[in-house]
Image (cartoon, rainbow, N blue to C red):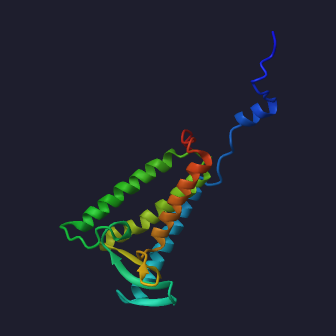
């Protein structure tokens, strides 16, 4: 019998390297909790500073033509969606939606493998941001936004620390899909 030259030779080292499990991520559940709490505290402190130092609908120019600090209230969802809608029990509805989303994110976070560093970091940021905005919705019925980025007459929606954490966290989750192929959600730790 002859050997099949179309099958590449695989060394023992290659087989061992492919079968060796990856070490757990340094982003443990404890680290995820700490990150989420830091985001929550930073978010609430900055919103408190804005509420006490900047009058509602006032603006402080920080970088001319690019960045202002403002004090606005968002009673709607992300990026001001439903902000101008008037409906009965809007605060209750927005708080309920935020709670459901937070529950879904928490459930997903509990299923992420201990080796998925980017996913764990992203989820920690998202959880901290979601908690920050939930505290506002549940306590006062709106979210304080204060970062106003603009160019000429174009303004991005005002946002806050929680929104920033959620956005960066979502980007990390997307990046993780490209880096790891999104394959390793099977070993929760």
140 to 4, vertically: above or below: below
The N terminus - image quarter: top right
Q: Image check: 113 left or right of 155?
A: right
Residue 3 in the image, given as x and y percentages of width and height: 80, 16
Q: What percent of the width, then of the height, locates residue 122?
A: 54, 58
Would you place residue 63 above or below residue 184 in this image?
below
147 horizontally vs 78: left or right: right
Which part of the image, by quadrant, shows the C terminus?
A: top right
Residue 174 in the figure: left or right of residue 16:
left
Residue 32 position by quadrant: bottom right
**Point 81% across, 33% down: residue:** 13
Q: Residue at x 35, y 86 (%)?
A: 57
The picture places residue 75, in percent across and down from the top left corner, at 30, 72
| Vertical arrangement, residue 131 with respect to residue 114, above or below | below
Nearer to the camera, 168 or 39: 168
**Residue occupying the point 56% across, 49% down:** 177
The residue that appears at 77% across and 34% down in the rendered structure is 14
What number of labels is visible?
0
Q: Is residue 173 visible?
A: yes
Vertical arrangement, residue 83 with respect to residue 64, above or below: above
């Amino acid at each position: 019998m002859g050997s099949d030259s179309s099958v590449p030779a695989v060394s023992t080292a290659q087989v061992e390297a492919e079968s060796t499990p990856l070490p757990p991520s340094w982003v443990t559940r404890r680290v995820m909790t700490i990150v989420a709490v830091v985001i929550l505290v930073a978010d609430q402190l900055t919103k408190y500073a804005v509420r006490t130092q900047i009058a509602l609908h006032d603006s402080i120019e920080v970088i001319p033509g690019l960045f202002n600090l403002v004090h606005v209230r968002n009673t709607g969802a992300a990026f001001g969606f439903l902000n101008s809608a008037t409906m009965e029990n809007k605060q209750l509805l927005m708080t309920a939606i935020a709670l459901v989303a937070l529950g879904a994110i928490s459930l997903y976070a509990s299923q992420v493998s201990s080796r998925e560093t980017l996913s764990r970091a992203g989820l920690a940021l998202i959880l901290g941001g979601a908690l920050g905005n939930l505290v506002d919705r549940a306590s006062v019925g709106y979210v304080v936004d204060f970062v106003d980025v603009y160019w000429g007459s174009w303004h991005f929606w005002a946002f806050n620390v929680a929104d920033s954490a959620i956005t960066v966290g979502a980007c990390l989750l997307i990046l993780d899909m490209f880096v790891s192929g999104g394959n390793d959600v099977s070993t929760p730790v």
